Amino acid sequence: MVLLHAHSVVAMETIMVTGASSGFGLETARYFHARGWRVIATMRTPRDDVLPVSERLTVLPLDVTDPDSIAAAFAQAGPVDVLVNNAGIGSIGVVEATPLEKARELFETNTFVVMATTKAVIPQFRERGSGIVVNVTSSVVLATMPLTAMYRASKMATEAFTASLALELASVGVDAKIVQPGYCPTTEFAANGGDLSDQFPETYAEFTAPILEAFSVQGNVTTPLDVAEAVWRAVHDTTGTLRFPAGPDAVALAQAR
């Protein structure tokens, strides 16, 4: 498959997706595979039952917080054309009641891991003069939202990292993109964040109750397919666009800005 790239005409065939066992990562792996790409689906605990059996699809173990695991995954994957940094965790809560250990965990998985996997793939991209890094952040970067301070901080850091990265990589023919998913109740956002019960003290009950109730309302929210489609647009972009909101709520927030 030959696609027009922002810098040149390159063969785009292999995509590596982190956190591909469920949610956005799983749908992105399926989406690209269905369109003829070779897909490297990575996950902490490999499972083959969620993806089609195919010569164009490889499932690899990857603990994104382990440098040795990152190195091993890239060694097994071989050359890739696109890296999608999707793996991440979520957390909501009142800052006063949220342990700093939780903040460190959020930055480790949502920010430092993105830096680590990106650094691992840049050499091969630079040597070929082509490649795309797509970092998945969140619509929380598009508006100030309560109960998300530490999570939002980790995603804002990734946004800042990617924006500067894009300028650096452009000098060697490589792109960096950001996909900003909206709120998706069907993902494992809360589950991946651990037990949050202690992060909502009674002192803040009057403030937090209506916000938590709003989270439970099934409105015009984001689906994993919305995110997969946004990743596809980011990968195929030839306009130099950096940010791609995904889902109707994220698009509305982006337009409001």
Image (tube, grey):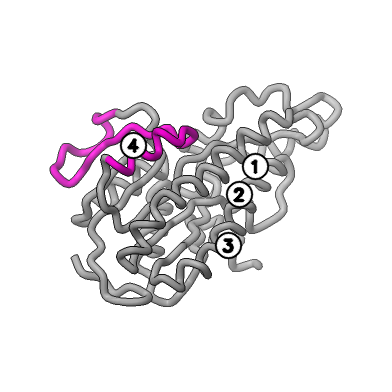
Q: In which quarter of the image is residue 59?
A: top left
Q: In which quarter of the image is the C terminus?
A: bottom right
Precedes in sequence: disc 2 or disc 4: 4
Asked which secondary structure carries label 2, the reply is: helix
Precedes in sequence: disc 3 or disc 4: 4
Q: Is 215 rendered above or below residue 120?
A: above
Q: How far apart are marks 3 and 4 (CA)?
A: 40 Å
- Between marks 4 and 1 in the image, the one whose residue lies nearer the viewer: 4
The amino acid on which the numbered mark 4 sits, given as a three-letter code, is Ala
Q: Nearer the viewer, residue 160 or 125?
A: 125
Name the residue beneath numbered marker 1: 151
Q: Is 141 rendered above or below residue 128?
A: above
Q: Say few, some or many: other residues with alpha carbon within 10 Å of mark 3 (under 14 / 14 to 19 / 20 or more).
A: some
Precedes in sequence: disc 1 or disc 3: 1
Q: Distance between the residues labelled 1 and 3?
A: 21 Å
Name the residue beneath numbered marker 4: 72
Q: Among all residues in the image, which is located at the extreme right?
A: 203
The amino acid on which the numbered mark 3 sits, given as a three-letter code, is Ala
Name the residue beneath numbered marker 2: 155
Q: Which residue is drawn at 81% across and 37% down?
A: 207
Q: Write the start and end of the magenta stretch as one range.
A: 47-75
Name the residue beneath numbered marker 3: 252
Q: Where is residue 39 in the image (x, y as percent from the top left)?
A: 25, 47
CB contact under 8 Å: marks 2 and 1: yes
Precedes in sequence: disc 4 or disc 1: 4
